[in-house]
Amino acid sequence: MYPLSGSTSASSAAQGEGEPPGRLPVIDRALVLVAGLVVVAVGFVGMTVGLFGWDAGSTLSWWVAQDPNRGRVLVSAVGAALAVIGAAALRPAVRSAGRDRTIVRSTSLGEVHISVRAIQTLARRAASQVQGIREAEVQVTPSSVGDVNVRVILTVAPDEPIPELCDQVQSRIDQYLRQTAGVSCGQIRLVVRGISRDGHRSRSE
């Protein structure tokens, strides 16, 4: 991976549009996978007890009695499993709440609120319009310097000059957000995740 970063600025008024649902981030997929495995394991044990009459309580008591430390290990494992399930349930809600935040613009007629989600859609659209970009995943967060910080994960076409390509993406995102939404960028950070193996150009709308 080739991380590159830069910063730019701008100002004024705006409007936005919604964002189609995308793939879950890696950490969310991992949490959901582990939580699913835990639930499946618990369900399998419950099914075994019900179908075959296994006395789980007696077996568990005997197993713990062999070594008192086993009880602490068991409680710790159950607690960890419940923590993972809780994290898997809460994290998407927390991320969604963060994306629904807005950037406020004051005009002579009142306030204009631009959602972070709409800005994210615009930034992804701008990045995907640069020739040589195959895929662009965008994360937008409010910034203390400009209006927003933008992080873009890119997949680029083969044989493209990556530094020049990243300069174009940063410049395009900065200009596009200023022109379409009046939003300034405190920082635009790019991460080149991979090189596309096919010749098909993919654009995220």
Image: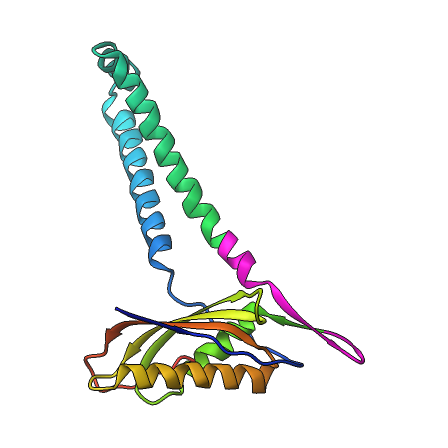
Taking depth in this image into account, of 6 and 124 the one nearest to the observer is 6
| Residue 19 visible, this angle | no
| Image side of residue 67 versus residue 113, left or right | left
**Residue at 46 percent of width and 50 percent of height:** 91
Colouring scheme, one of rainbow, by chain, secondary structure, one colour:
rainbow
Give the percent coordinates (x, y) of residue 108. Answer: 80, 80
Of all residues, the one furthest to the right in this rendering is: 109
Q: Is residue 40 magenta?
A: no
Residue 46 placement: quadrant: top left
Q: Is residue 107 magenta?
A: yes
| Image side of residue 61 versus residue 88, left or right | left
Residue 98 placement: quadrant: bottom right
Magenta span covers which residues?
Answer: 94-111
**Residue at 30 percent of width and 23 percent of height:** 74
| Residue 132 visible, this angle | yes
Give the percent coordinates (x, y) of residue 21. Answer: 45, 68
**Residue at 29 percent of width and 42 percent of height:** 37
